[in-house]
Amino acid sequence: MEPILVTGGSGTLGRRLVDRLVADGRTVRVLSRRPRPAQTATVIEWITGDLLTGAGLDTALADGAVVVHCATNPVRPRQDIEATGRLIEAARQAATPHLLHVSIVGIDLVPLPYYRAKLRVERLIEESGLPWTIQRATQFHELVLAAAHKLTRGPVGIAPAVITQPVAADEVAERLAALTQQGPAGRVPDLGGPASGTLAEFIRATLDAEGRRRPLLPLRIPGRTGRALHQGHLTTREPNTGRLTFREFLTP
């Protein structure tokens, strides 16, 4: 069976995907700008390289490797476009049999700069001439938890008017691992968590789980972005949703 290259293999999703693929007995490679961490399993092929420069890609893509493209940079979204273009160019030369990309639900409806970049990445993949699959997912439980902590640092918490549907990163990794075995499938059904709700509800769940008390001040985000976030465009209408609820995620 061909090796699997995971870009962004040290991130929130990438780490979980790598562990699952290893558990499934797959040959796994990780392309990273950082040296191999000391605790990394020796069965993982760790390749030091850079998607922006192309360094290490020839080695990473050798032997007909399937690619799961998880690498992303929300702080510098333009780099996502550049990195994906470089990856596609190298994958064409290597005759990559399957490029699987994880994207975000709502990027075509919420006019954030990062989402515009992610939508452009999808278009690059669709037009690449490579066999491809795109899996969109909603926000991870970990991201919602981090947002809840950030928004409740002070004596009064802030609750932006956002409807979201958080999903377990482990379940997204599970879906991606299954897709690597199914072959190119184009745009597959979106994956979200088992329940949607307002960000205020998820913040309150976090406060309750941690035994903290904060009054929450509602915050309406202005403009088209605010309307899109309030109208639930970060959620999926697909029936095939995740299993672990946010409250279950918060339970030790």
Image (cartoon, rainbow, N blue to C red):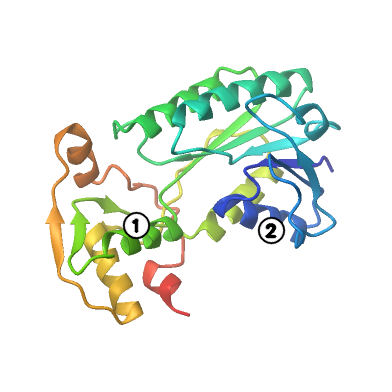
Give me the disc on residue 240.
none
Indicate the position of residue 37 as horizontal and vertical percent values: 73, 55
Q: Say which of marks 2 and 1 sits in front.
A: 1
Q: Which label number is shown at residue 20?
A: 2
- Give the residue type at disc 2: Arg
The residue sitting at 19% across, 69% down in the picture is 155
Point 75% across, 47% down: residue: 35
Q: Is residue 198 visible?
A: no
Q: Where's residue 227, x and y in %?
A: 17, 39
Label 1 residue SS: helix
How far apart in space, not on screen, are marks 2 and 1 (Cα)? 27 Å
Q: Is residue 32 left or right of residue 169?
A: right
- Residue 215: image quadrant is bottom left
Furthest residue toward front: 154
Q: Residues within 10 Å of mark 2 (few under 14, many from 20)?
A: some
Q: At numbered mark 2, what does the secondary structure look like: helix, strand or loop?
A: helix
What residue appears at the point 32 percent right and 59 percent down from the top-left corner? Answer: 150
Three-letter residue code for mark 1:
Ala
Residue placed most toward the observer, 219 or 182: 219
Task: Report whether residue 8 is seen.
Answer: yes
Above-or-below relation of 17 to 53 = below
Q: Nearer the viewer, residue 105 or 71?
A: 71
Q: Is residue 32 above or below residue 170?
A: above
Q: Which residue is mark 1?
A: 147
The percent position of residue 34, horizontal first and vertical second, equals 69, 44
Q: Is residue 125 left or right of residue 112?
A: right
Q: Is residue 247 above or below residue 128?
A: below
Q: Earlier in the sequence, mark 2 or mark 1?
A: 2
